[in-house]
Image (cartoon, rainbow, N blue to C red):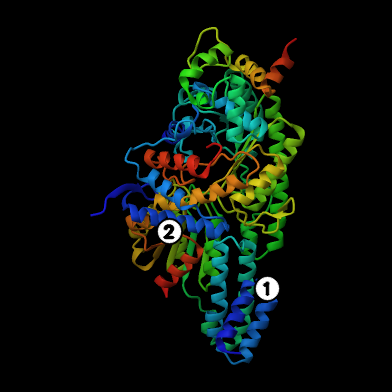
Amino acid sequence: MGMPISHIMTSGMSGIRAAGDLVARMQLAKNMRIGEAKDYVAKKLDVTTDDLSDEYVMRELREDLGIGVITSVAGAPKGIAAKMNIEKLLGIDINCCEKFRGQLK
Amino acid sequence: MSKEEMFKELSDAIVSCKKDAVEAAVEKARDEGIDAAEIIEKGLAAGMNEVGILFERGKLFLPHVMMAAGAMEAGVALLEADMPKEEASKKLAVIVNGTVEGDVHDIGKSIVSTMLQSSGFEVHDIGRDVPLQDFIDKIKETDANMVGMSALMTTTLSGQKEVIEMLKEQGLRDKVKVMVGGAPATQAWADKIGADCYAENASEAVAKAKELLI
Amino acid sequence: MATEYKLRMGDGKRIFMTKEQIVADLKEGMADAADLGEIPELSEDEVDKLADIVTMPSRMVGVEQGKEVPVTHDIGTIRIDGDQGNSGVGIPSSRLVGAMMHERAFGADTMELGHIDYSYKPVKPVIAQEMQTMEVCQQNMIVPLLYGAMPNMGLYYTPDGPFPNPGDLMKAFKIQEAQEAMEHAAEHLTRDTVWIMQRLMSSGADGVNFDTIGAAGDGDMFASLHAIEALRKQYPDIYIEAGMAGELLLGLHGEMEYDGTVLAGLWPHQQAPLAAKAGANVFGPVVNTNTSKSSPWNLGRAVTFIKAAVEASPIPCHVNMGMGVGGIPMFETPTIDAVSRASKAMVEIAGVDGI
């Protein structure tokens, strides 16, 4: 386990601790290279690209936007609810959200 | 044509991997009165060595190595009539080669077997994921001079050490050379477990086997 | 006496080297990659920067602030609940717990669900379990969650599969039969992978990770590229990661082509455009570590190969940096000093889009 944690500490964007999941999602959804993905997400969040790896900036912003925070905040969107907000924020469709909507009667 | 040019033609024919070209070159060399042993060693075997280098560099691939080995075999067969009977059938040494128990990696070990075989060794490839006792049994059965052991995982590497211990227990260690290989193996590992040599790739395996056995 | 720096061999062992020795090894590794791949060497500035990273006194180093990249995860949760055979740490836990630990405790940017065997073929008999687990994970997680496994075409040959083993056929000089066996196996591998992912996409998977493409040679890549192509056609929005097994695509068949390109003998910078052409979103180039060489030699070589791949790739490149790849020592517990340095070098010099 030391190896992946070392990578995250050395180079990673900290996932939902900051905005790593959002940047990764744009790379995976739209083939965006790192610079383009960071610019896109920063613009959508109205922050700088440096802020995307800044826990201080992202902690409150994530809670405000309802896109999931790393600490378990009671009542805050989690799982699919958080991802539905990410869909709107980033302007993309997420497969599990589509499936969830499809299951509603 | 000078001898050197003839050896080059033989070597190039092997690198072309074409049986017809090798047979033609061998006939030509024989007609020029070159000794059969020299044709094999300085022409055909030198070509196989070049094939090994091109394989390591990603310029030739396994099917080519096999075709080259097949062409070499055909070339050697043509020369057998010219050689003393015992020399024609004589193999350099007997080697048992396999991937140790728990490890299913096959490709690298098979390439080493092929290269050793095409260099004149009698090779008994006992496959992958081989129970350690099988190495000992095969060594006894074939009266082998060397055992080659491959491991591709750090977790199966210890099998190489265990076989060495088993060889000692059986009183075979002094008569059987041990070669180890595989991505996690190193010269330091070979030294640590008391192997006779470590080979990084197939060409090195051939060179080291020749160094230790001939 | 010249200052000596604490470094590692490719197997992780501690060594001491002077700056001159380090630079010499960096350059030798770089030259090896440039020679084999017929790609440009690093500039003097880049070599100097690599030497600076390698000789930094702190145990752990980090990328400059603002240069962070996503760190994606393969091997699923096997690292948590797996055994020594797959480098797991043996903590009894469900895969949901494992995946959420990566997301919540470790700060992973993406995660992957995989099963204990980690090859596609054995997923077929347990597909319902995989679908159920994917649904539960997707309901609870936020980071992109892919399904991942190894194409592992070797499982389609005897004794594990229906086709004759090309290794045995080759040894018997039955080259054409060996090639035919590979072609049949590739067809089945493509079909199985697509079938599996159709079901996982119906369970909400974000996408798929092909881990260690090419481990069974060019046929393995041929099958994977065709599976990627089929999945992209059926699911335009699926996330697809194509990760390789090594820097050189071994030509076990030797004549297989994709999009008019012979697959055998391709290096990372030649593999990336093909993965993109097939429809992958992210390419994972790999450079294996030589255990008999020093970490600077390995890092110089790996960074040179990866930099060329990043430049040639039309899609993001997430370099593979597990044990024994990407300049990291091949050791069960790779040392943090070596991992951290390799990680920083890949981001800042090779310019990777992720890890």
For the point 53% across and 71% down, the residue is: B49
Q: Nearer the viewer, residue C272 or A57?
A: A57
The circle on residue B180 is: 2
SS of the residue under disc 1: loop
Residue A45 left/right relative to C301:
right
Q: Is residue C306 above or below residue B64?
A: above
- The quarter of the rendered structure image containing the N terminus of chain C is bottom left
Q: Is residue A1 above or below residue A102?
A: below
Amino acid at dot 2: Val
For the point 53% across and 72% down, the residue is: B119
* Image coords of residue C69 (percent x, y): 52, 33
* Image coords of residue C266 (percent x, y): 62, 54
Amino acid at dot 1: Lys
Farthest left residue in view? C1
Q: Residues within 10 Å of mark 2 (few under 14, many from 20)?
A: many
SS of the residue under disc 2: strand
Q: Nearer the viewer, residue C231 or B95?
A: C231
* Image coords of residue C336 (percent x, y): 38, 38
Farthest top residue in view? A75
* Image coords of residue C267 (percent x, y): 59, 53
Is residue C216 visible from the viewing direction of this image?
no
For the point 76% across and 33% down, the residue is: C234
Q: Nearer the viewer, mark 2 or mark 1?
A: 1
**Quarter location, residue B118:** bottom right
Read off the residue under disc 1: B18
Is residue A46 visible from the viewing direction of this image?
yes
**Dot 1 falls on which chain?**
B
Disc 2/disc 1 C-alpha distance (Å): 32 Å
Q: Is residue B139 above or below residue C15?
A: below
Q: Residues within 10 Å of mark 1 (few under 14, many from 20)?
A: some
Q: Nearer the viewer, residue C38 or B4?
A: C38
Callouts 2 and 1 in the same chain: yes
